[in-house]
Image: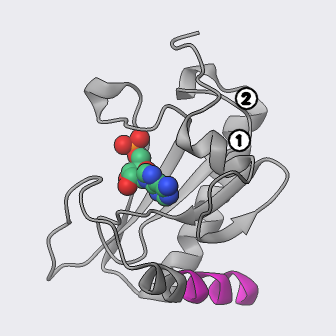
Amino acid sequence: MSNAYDPNNIFARILRGELPCTKVYEDDDTIAFMDIMPQSDGHTLVVTKEPAAEIFDLSEAAAGAAIRTTQRVARAVRAAFSPDGISIGQFNGAAAGQTVPHVHFHIVPRYADRALRGHGTDIQDPAVLAEHAGRIIAALREA
Ligand code: AMP
């Protein structure tokens, strides 16, 4: 194990329903919701339900489920936002930029004419997040 798992990290609390999120997708193994401080419009997170701080700690089954959901949601983000590209990222350890110690994948649309906003800097208006989530949910329905 690379890290002791903190069961009170913010994503564990979202998974337990103790904190809200702007959800776009959920299945038995994963949940996907809008990043509250998006680096670009459509920035979405895919979170494993299996409790693990870093990718090294995940079971193979949970890792497989996470990447399947990431691909599925990324396709919907692409359909919803038509970005010029999409970065997919996953950070392990504070030195790598990880701020929430529960495994998650970032789906970050990239727009050629816009620079990324800072990582975890500006909280987005909840109404904007809800509108973006609605576009992704609609694209998932059509997939
Ligand atoms: P990382 O730095 O890779 O651990 O990413 C954590 C991400 O979670 C950052 O991009 C934050 O903006 C995002 N974040 C933090 N708190 C919340 C929250 N309550 N709901 C949604 N996203 C969050």
Residue in the image at 56% along x and 80% along y: 133
Predominant secondary structure, magenta span? helix
Span highlighted in magenta in the image:
133-143
Callout 2, which amino acid? Glu
Residue in the image at 38% along x and 24% along y: 93
Percent x, y of residue 15: 71, 48
Residue in the image at 71% along x and 41% along y: 64
Percent x, y of residue 63: 67, 37
Q: Going by the image, does 135 lie left or right of 69?
A: left
Q: What residue is disc 1 on?
A: 64
Q: Is residue 76 above or below residue 100?
A: below
Judged from the image, the secondary structure of the residue bearing numbered disc 1 is helix
Residue furthest top in the image = 1
> On the rendered image, what quadrant is the N terminus found in?
top right
The label shown at residue 29 is none
- Residue 83 lies within the magenta run: no
Q: What residue is disc 2 on?
A: 60
Name the quadrant containing residue 134: bottom right
Q: Going by the image, does 116 lie left or right of 5?
A: left
Residue furthest front in the image = 18
Q: Going by the image, does 77 lie left or right of 116?
A: right
Q: Is residue 61 above or below residue 6?
A: below
> On the rendered image, what quadrant is the C terminus found in?
bottom right
Instruction: Measure the alpha-carbon separation of dots 2 and 1.
Output: 6 Å
The count of marks equals 2
Callouts 2 and 1 close, C-beta under 8 Å:
yes
Q: Is residue 56 above or below residue 71?
A: above
What colour-coding does the image apply? one colour
